[in-house]
Image (tube, rainbow, N blue to C red):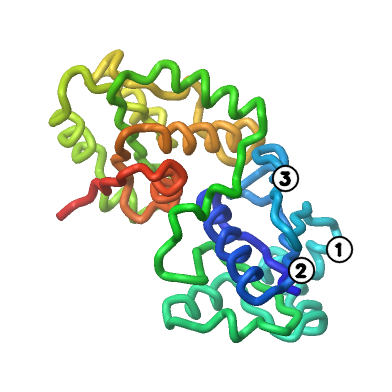
Amino acid sequence: MITFVPAGGLGNRMKSMAAAIRLAQATESDLDIIWFQDWGLGCRFDHLFQPLAIPQTRLREASFLDQMMRDIPRKRNLYIPKVFEHCLYDECLDRIGASKAYYHDFDFTAWCKGKKVWLASDVYFIAKEIPEDSFDIFHPVSHLQERINQAKEGFARHTIGVHIRRTDNVRSIQNSPTHLFIERMQQEPTETKFYLATDSEEVKEEMRNIFGKRIITSPNKATRGNLEGMEDALVEMYLLAATHRILGSSCSTYSMTAASIGRTPLETIEKK
């Protein structure tokens, strides 16, 4: 049995869940995925996605007992879950431990095979390369898929996705300044449209002033702490995936996940 806690934002959770499913299949283990809401992702799984249709895999919302016994040990819960997890499971790896293990080519399969383990992660820990079909297991709920389909109708024959991360990713802000996106976008033919996904209202306004009606973007203010914000984040991710190419931000899982979903070429805009 593998008990898995996906961590981080939307893209991080999707890729870590895909890794956990692959690990469970490789070790012939049952998989129990526990979904915790927090500041980085403030809604339930089933508010965004249809149920996972994967044998021997269960996904459930965290209960009060889960918060006390199976959450990621951290300051806000006084590290109390750590005590229970080491009593309940043969082996445990938290988010930081799993990331360190991943970068040191740790054998997760041997670690958990035949055992009862607890694991939390925000990376695709099982391999260095993410298989292109890894995100095919995720399907947006019907009303969000309708929003995606309707928005795609406004795409031009050639539409490029642009993802500019600003509010909460220091490396993206430093390595992928807005002026580099503008310079790259100005190289495209005038008939090209741009689907802009960003967490900055200032960036939206700047892009509209420069590119006018060539910019397609959400009219909603970006936020990730409530249901409406997470719905918008999901819709934007799948719209990026539907473009011909993505101009993405440095060190952004969101850009990479969108590219993987659509098998879309990703060009990372960053300082040389």
CB atoms of marks 2 and 1 within 8 Å = yes
Quadrant, the N terminus: bottom right
Residue 162 sits in quarter: top left
List the residue tagged with mark 2.
70
- What residue is shown at x 56% (from left), y 80% (from top)? 108
Inter-mark Cα distance, 3 to 1: 23 Å
Q: Report the quarter where the C terminus lies.
A: bottom left
How far apart are labels 2 and 1 at the CA level? 8 Å
Residue drawn 71% across the image and 55% down it:
35
Up/down of 36 relative to 85, above or below: above
Where does residue 72 sit, x and y in percent of width and height?
A: 68, 68
Q: SS class of the residue under badge 2?
A: loop
Q: Position of residue 229 (x, y in %)?
A: 58, 34
Q: Does 258 sit left or right of 90 as displayed?
A: left
Q: Earlier in the sequence, mark 3 or mark 1?
A: 3
Residue 183: give x, y in percent of width and height.
15, 34
Q: Which residue is mark 1?
A: 65
Q: Position of residue 116 (x, y in %)?
A: 75, 80
On the image, numbered disc 3 is attached to which residue?
A: 51
Which labelled disc corresponds to residue 133?
Answer: none
Inspect this view and state whether residue 179 appears. Answer: yes
